[in-house]
Amino acid sequence: MAEVAHAEVGHDDHHDHHEPSFWSKYVFSTDHKMIAMQYMFTGMAMALIGGFFAYVFRMQLAFPGASIPFWGTLSPAAYNSLVTNHGTIMIFWVAMPVLIAAMGNFLIPLMIGCDDMVFPRVNRLSYQIFLISAIVLIISFFVPGGGFGGAWTAYPPLSAKAQYNATPFGAPLWLIAVTLEIVAFLLGGINFITTVMNARAKGMRMYDIPIIVWMIVIASILFMCSVGPLIAGAVMLLFDQTLGTGFFDGAAGGDPVLWQHLFWFFGHPEVYVVLLPAMGIVGEITCTFARKKLFAYKLILYSTIGLGILSFFVWAHHQFISGVDPRAAYLFTTTTLLISIPVAIVLFAYIATLYGGSIRFTTAMLFALAFTGEFLLGGVTGIWLGSSGVDVYLHDTYFVLAHFHYTFVPIAIIATFAAVYYWYPKMFGRKMNETWGKIHFWGTTVSFNGIFIPLFILGAGGQHRRIYNFQHYPDLAGADMQDMRVFATLSLIVMLAFQVIFIVNFFVSLKRGEKAGNNPWKANTLEWVATSPAPHGNFGPVMPEVYRGPYEYSVEGREEDYWPQNEKPSDS
Amino acid sequence: MKTIDPSFAEPIDSDRSPALSSSALGILVFIVTELMFFAALISAYLIIKAGPEAWPPAGQPRLPIEASAVNSLILFASGYILFRGYRSFVKEGNSEGTVKLVRFCLLLGVVFVAVQGFEWVRLVGFGLTMTSSQYGAFFYLIVGTHGIHAIGALIGIWRLYVKLRAGILRQSSFQGVLFFWYFVVGIWPILYVLVYLS
Ligand code: HEM
Ligand SMILES: [Cu+2]
């Protein structure tokens, strides 16, 4: 707290203008863009680890017992650990840092026209804690007993007692890492909300704020309101693991389902925490490349707020078979079906934005369109799962797994790629190669469907999650089912292989990409006013002033088909 | 480590005057998270308490209700005095009076934490520990969490006191710490009623 309270004073000692050293420029920087890059590169590195884990355990499922290239044979314990940490990494160390932290840090000050976050040093602290959390997680893979293997949801008693999970050090380290990571985002969230409230450019009123900024702020509020219970649960679980308390131990008078409530009270809003920034990204890109005003800006905004509120009342749809009272299940079914309405409104507003536009199929736009289409599938299958009668059969099958991958992959992979292709010029001053970008796009999205459509079918056929070797179960060992598993695994390998193209394109374009100029996409929002890449302080001596909303594209009677927010009206 | 701060940020509110300073707003957002955190602890406590076991269980020491009540009064007084200190700071800056009030608040806060610590030592001596029962576990969990917050806030007040004496304290910083201390003081009676009086 003390740090928060005193950060303002810190502004005073910033004014010595000497050339910053390597350490102060790249490692201990307080500049929001540099912190965004730190988050982004850490997130991308973690994504490689998480992707590799997926490759290993998918190989085991497709070719049980075979020796896996780059790994060897996979033991059941290692399988559990890989599955657990794959999920943990992708949600907490990839989706969160890239979508919320990197995008929020990079875009918020640029888009609302200010020079930095209001608490730059808190911001730096946030990344440092995040980095430590990632290191703790990675260390946990190498301690005696190996990394935690009790699933990313860490249900007790499996997670609470070393005699069950057999990871006496991995389990507590995992928990500590998650808690630290969450503390890091707490600091970030405070910064985002406060900055947008207090530091907007002159003239930027409520409805002039770009939709992505709204979405990141609403996501931050959701995060801040939902994370307390998870921290409380994590502390209690850590005590159960290390001090021998029995908060979640039925035999000691505790209650294991209590953990599920604490976890999912956070867990469900959390899925919207990552969803909203992705939807914001897609909204921005759709408008820019359809050259159309965002359809129903206010409706989108208010739907998002409604969605945020509702997201606190759906959590028990994860617990329909955990002994939740059927009458309560009925209520949670209702709220779950209700929440798909605002989600659908936003998506349909994006589709309506496309209507009659002059669409440019850049790589970023392709990814944005793919998000809208693929996420719809994820959302629709969520409605089935939300109906408790159906979910009794589908719970913990691959159908659930395919459902949330059809939400998470569009969010954390597809929308993130859209954002990278779109804002890359602002980050590094050059464009990424479009041809390779499109090859990467098709390779990624087609193979993504190749992975998860078979898993929907397998799940509906009764294939349970978290099973090491399906050959042990006669019902699941048939050749037709095994063929689908092999197909999914091969698709995964194809998808991973296509990421090489992205990585090469990313790094080659740093040096060789086409020079971008300030506003390569002819977009309206303020980040395109700054030079590419944006300097310290973002806008130089004159901060931009805002005269209109962010989506004035193809306005009649204007020569240009765009109208930057900061352009002075000619008649005044 | 001054050189590692290349941010060019001007004081943000130079040309606009937001309703709340950034420090105060940041702390308020943080307090919302804290409220949800305590709400989770409390609901966990209520759920377990409603379980089949006797509450408080036989053979476990009773909590010191009266002593803690007196201690609560000390905490409230400290909250009120920081409020007076803030008012005085707004009116007369870092005057002698302000410094005295902040120092007094700090002192009372430290007394509160010390008495709590003393109680804990006695309770542990009587056999109430985190593993002796759910009753003990929740007592230390909830009251301990509050205690850690109190200590954190006192460190904040102490830093504030140092800056006040050096004459470099900003009103917004004071406000932020004040809000957080209100939170620590304000949540205490709820915890007291729930944990001690049941
Ligand atoms: C309209 C939107 C959505 C609805 C109605 C919905 C509904 C559901 C339901 C009912 C379940 C529980 C299934 C079960 O375990 O038996 C579920 C699981 C899940 N959903 Fe969704 N969902 C929606 C959107 C999302 C989004 C946007 C995400 C991610 C960003 C997501 C991520 C997940 C995850 C991770 C799980 C499984 C957790 C686990 O058991 O490991 N969902 N969803
Ligand atoms: Cu959910």
Image: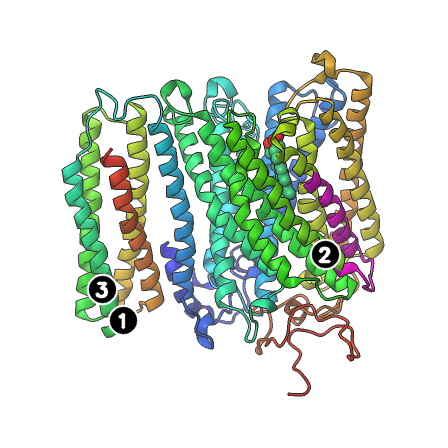
Q: Marks 1 and 2, how far apart in space?
A: 50 Å
Mark 1 lies on a secondary structure that is helix
Q: Which residue is mark 3?
A: B85
**Callout 1: chain:** B
Judged from this view, the residue extending furthest toward the bottom is A572
Q: Main secondary structure of the magenta part?
A: helix
Please determine whether, in this image, residue A49 is positioned above or below residue A221. Answer: above
Around disc 2, counting alpha carbons within 10 Å, would you say few (fewer than 14), some (14 to 19), or many (20 or more)? many
- Residue, x 62% and y 77% (percent of image)? A547
Picture quadrant of residue A286: bottom right
Query: Nearest the camera: B83 or B53?
Result: B53
Colour style of the rendered protein structure: rainbow
Q: Which mark is residue B90?
A: 1
- Residue, x 72% and y 47% (percent of image)? A414
Q: Is residue A361 magenta?
A: yes
Around disc 3, counting alpha carbons within 10 Å, would you say few (fewer than 14), some (14 to 19), or many (20 or more)? many
Which range is magenta? A353-380
Query: Nearest the camera: A399 or A46?
Result: A399
